[in-house]
Each structure stands twice: as structure tokens, then as C-alpha cells.
Amino acid sequence: MFTLLTCVMFMAFVAYYSWRKTKGQVSTASGYFLAGNGLGSVFIAGSLLLTNISTEQLIGQSGLTYFGNLTPLAWEVWAVRGIILLACLFLPMYLGGAFATIPEFLKSRYGEGTRRLVVGLLMFGYIFVWSPSILYGGSLALMKILNIEQTFGLSQVSALWIVTWVIGIIGAFYAVAGGLRAVAISDTLNGIGLLVIGCLVPVFGLMALGDQIGGSMTDALHHIATTHTEKLNAIGTGNKGDVIPFSAIFTGLMVMATFYWATNQFVIQRALGAASLKEGQKGLLLSGFFKMLVPFIAMFPGILAFHLFGDGLSPRDIAYPTLVRETLPAPLMGLFIAVLLGAVFSTYNSLLNSAATMFALDIYKPFIDKNVGDTKLIFVSKVFAIICAGFTLFAAPMLLNAPDGLFVFLQKFTGFIAIPIVSLVLMGLFTGKLRIPGRAAQFIIVFHVITYYLLVWGLERTLEIKVPIHWMHVFGLLFVIEVSILVVWALVKPSKEAFVHIHKPKVEMQPWRYAMLTSSVLLSLAVLSYIVFSNVGLAYADAVVSPIFGKVILITIGACIGVSVWAHTKLQPKYKRYVVSRYGSEADKKALESEKTLVNAIESSSK
């Protein structure tokens, strides 16, 4: 009863606070879909943190590290590349054109036919892949933590259906009732709880391991660093425990990070609702530091579960809920369940909100009722969100036997959507002079769906021909092929009309003065993490770390400091001039010219 009471109280507080903060602010389309362009950096960072961290991380990544090693680290620490691309390159273009959705931008670049296909792709992913995966992971965790099957005498399938429907119905409420602002506020509150409780889970796991080996937490850490050290290797060992090969960091993973953080509607929608370019960049880059905590919150528990319970847990995805059930003190269990539900609700209602936004702005308004008012548009989006929720409630329990674990299943199916969208958005944003016709863009989408299926599944299943490269490398290969097709098509048979970028920003377009410095620090942390979790660092077999670890770390830190200083002093001024000259207002451009004149005068005087 105490567990249930604390869970309900925390969830009720989040719901009440979100309702109070959104009361009277979602009566317009702008307020409902983009929070009235009033989101500050803290809300953006907090919302992105919890939107990104959900059951596919907590459950899926812990299962991967329990079964294999730390190669899933690449998904998290190298995500900062996608965050930096969005903050520094994509966001100025998005805000400068005042786009509300990615399909809206693609329509302006490639025509209406392309928008329809992209909306179809994203809708498929949101309704039949991502939302069901999120609900399934959360339901599985709650079933194991609360022993729902044994408590109520239910079969695993029955329990999964019941828990899925309860979570799905409650989670849909935030998105349907409050729009983006409610999602962002509730995400921020739940994010605080996730950081606190999520960090406590591995702490209590270390305490339990220390007790098991007859020592302290320090002894537990030493035990992990000297026993089965291959599990601490993020670079990989070339065996079946490697979820992702190290080389994929430079191929498919780069494409996936760009898609997820820079072109995925349900992620970038927070940035599109920023009060200014500066606030958007601050919030995005701050979320990059939060991403560095994810391995500790979502991957380290899998390693702890291996050392505590051995390698006999099955399926692998129950490693995290088993660790929680066996190590977390009872007084904290209610808060943990509330935070876990918050993580599920966050991603789930973000998906519903973005799906409803695209349906309202990209399908209903342009094709069904061009003169629709804000009140009816919001009503239509809510009805569509309810319909989407119904589909996901039926689809989620069917993932009970997901191959390769939940996380890998989700990433493989994301491949259907990610590569063509990244290709089209990149070429659309940064090759304005290249006249890519709409037919080329539409061909790329159809070509990709068919080719990707054949390379990852179809050839092996139908012709027993196994493609001899990792499925992540397929991402990178198809990206190069599809971009090449677009370029060649544009050169051979260009569009008759040139693309003209429409400049109509609704917010201030001054970049954050520390954007380049912060980006450099984030990349430096990613590099350092790979040194720590390698054969030179904690994965060294004969001791805690290798004899050369200290020298390697010092040299790397020195190089990172040098790059960061250069980025702030040399690159930042050039970046500011680039952004203001392309996307700033006339007043901003005049101020920049005055500043440049003053700097030149000072330099001349000093000489």
C-alpha cells in the first residue's frame, strides 16, 4: 500500500502541476503544437532527457550489457554528434523558416508527393514500431518488479495485456489534454525523478554486490574492474557479445544519430518550440551532458545484474527489473515505479503528440479543410491521437518475443524510416542550388524501403543469401547510395524550378555564445569515455587499468582542451557571422557589421 500510495501521489503531483502551467495556453494551434514558441532551455533539456530515456534504454540496454559488453555505449555517448548537428546547423534553418514539422519542410523542398510519403513513413514508425515498443518495455518491467503474474494469478500474456492498457490509457492523457507544453513540463518533473532514482539503482546494486562478496561498495567496484573485464569493453572484442562494431560509429550510427536528434519530429519538436535560437541551443547542448549519464543509469545495471545473478536470466530484458526488485529498498519502490511510468509516458505521449501534429498540419489542414480554425484543428488532432493510442494498445503485447532483445528490434525497424529522411533533409537544407526534382525524392523513399528489407531480412529468408556486413553498416551504405542518386538525378534531369528558402523567423536568431565551446567539450567527453572503457582502461585484464592509462588520459585531455579553446576563440566568431548573416533580422545584421567594424578598428590601433 505504501508503494502504491507514493507512486500515485508523485504521478498526481506531476499531472496537477502540468495542468496548472498549461491552463489557458493551449487554445491556439501554436500553443498546442509548439508551446507558443515559449520553451526555455531548462524545459527543452529536461523534456529531451526523459523523451530519450525510456524503457528501450532502461530495459533494452541493460539487457544488452547483461548478455554482452559495453558496446551499446556508442548509442549514447556518440549521440552528442546528432545533438550538436541539430543545435548548430539544423535548428537555425528550422527556426529561420518557421517550420512546424519535418514533412512541412520537405514539401517546400520536394513537393506535396514527398510530404505524403514521409508522413506515411513516420506515422508507420510512431504507431506500429516506437509506441508499441515503449509500452511493451514498460509493461514488462512493471510485471517483473511487482510480480503481477503471481500476485493476481494471471498468465504472462494476460498480465502483459492488462498492464499495457493501463499504462497506455494514462500516458495518452498528457499528450491529448495538454499538447507540447504539458508534455515538456511533465517530462522535466519526471526527469528530475529519473535522475535521482535512476542513479540510486546502480548504487544499491553496488551495495548488494559488496554484501555478496563480503566487502563494501569500493570492493564491489574493484571486483567489477578485475572480474570478467571483457564486459567493460566499449570498443568490442569481435565476438557475439558485440552489439555494435566499433567501425559502425563512423557509418550507420552517425546516420542514426543524425536522424534521431536532427530530423525526428517527436524529438526536434521541443527545439522547434524554443523561445529563441539561443534558448534552443542551450537546451539541446545541455541535454548532451545528460546523455553522458545514461550509460550509468541504463547500462551499468546490466553489468551489476550479471555479477549478482550470473548469466542465467532469461529473457535478457528482465535483467534491469530483476536488479530493481532484488536491491531497491521498499520505501523507494513506489517512487521508482512512478519514475519508470514517467519515462514510459514521456516517450509515449511525445510520439502521440507528434503524430497528432503531423496529421493535423500535414494531412487534415492541406487536404481536408484548408480553412479550418484552431479550435477544430486541435479537436481533430486529439481524436487522431486517441485513435493512434488504440492501435498501439493492441500492437504492444505482440512484441513479447522480440528477436535480439527489445532495443535491437527497435533500431532495426527504425532503419526503414531513418535513412531516406536523413538523406532528403540533408540535401534539402544544405544543397539549395542543386535542383533535386520531387520524383527523385519519392523514388528514394520507395527504393530504400524495398532495398533495406532485402539486405537486412529478405535475401536471407527467401534466397538464403546472408549479406556479409553488419546491419548498422547497411545504414551507412544505403545513405551514401541514396545521396548519390539524388545528386546524379539533379545533374542529369534537374527540376525546372530552383528552390528558394523562405526566411520568416518568429523568434530571435542570435546564436548562443558558448555553442562551439560546449560542443567541443561534449565531443571530448565522448572520446575520453572510450579510453576509460577500453583495453587501456577498465577493460584491461590484469589490473584495474593498464600501466599506460594515466599517460593516455593526460595526452587526450590536453588535446581536448586545445581543441575547445580554438573552437571558442576562432570558430565561434565565424559561426556567429554565418548564422546572423543567413538567418538574422536586419537589425541583427547591422549590429554584426558594427561589431566587426569595431573589432577591426581595435586591431588596427593595437598594431
Image (tube, grey):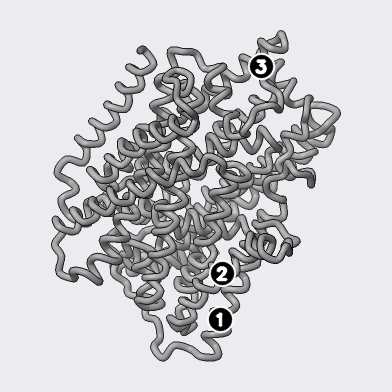
Q: Nearer the viewer, residue 577 or 129?
A: 129
Q: Nearer the viewer, residue 413 or 192?
A: 413
Disc 3 from disc 2: Cα separation: 48 Å
Q: Amino acid at mark 3?
A: Leu
In this rendering, position of residue 261 left or right of residue 338? right
- Closer to the observer: label 1 or label 2? 2
Q: Is residue 170 above or below residue 561?
A: above
- N-term-proximal mark, 1 vs 2: 2
Where is residue 101? Give x, y as percent: 34, 62
Residue 487 badge: 1
Disc 1 from disc 2: Cα separation: 21 Å
Where is residue 270? Give x, y as percent: 36, 50
Residue 209 badge: 3
- SS type, badge 1: helix
- Closer to the observer: label 3 or label 2? 2
* Quadrant, the N terminus: top left
At a point 82% along the width and 27% down the height, the residue shown is: 543
- SS type, badge 3: helix
Q: Is residue 136 visible?
A: yes
Q: Nearer the viewer, residue 585 or 391?
A: 391
Q: Amino acid at mark 2?
A: Ile
Where is residue 378? Give x, y as percent: 20, 54
At a point 45% along the width and 34% down the height, the residue shown is: 138
At a point 17% along the width and 54% down the height, the residue shown is: 28
Tally of marks: 3
Where is residue 295? Give x, y as percent: 59, 36
For disc 2, the marked residue is 450
The local crowd at label 2, few if under 14, some if 14 to 19, many if 20 or more residues have their Cα within 10 Å, is few
At a point 30% along the width and 55% down the height, the residue shown is: 356
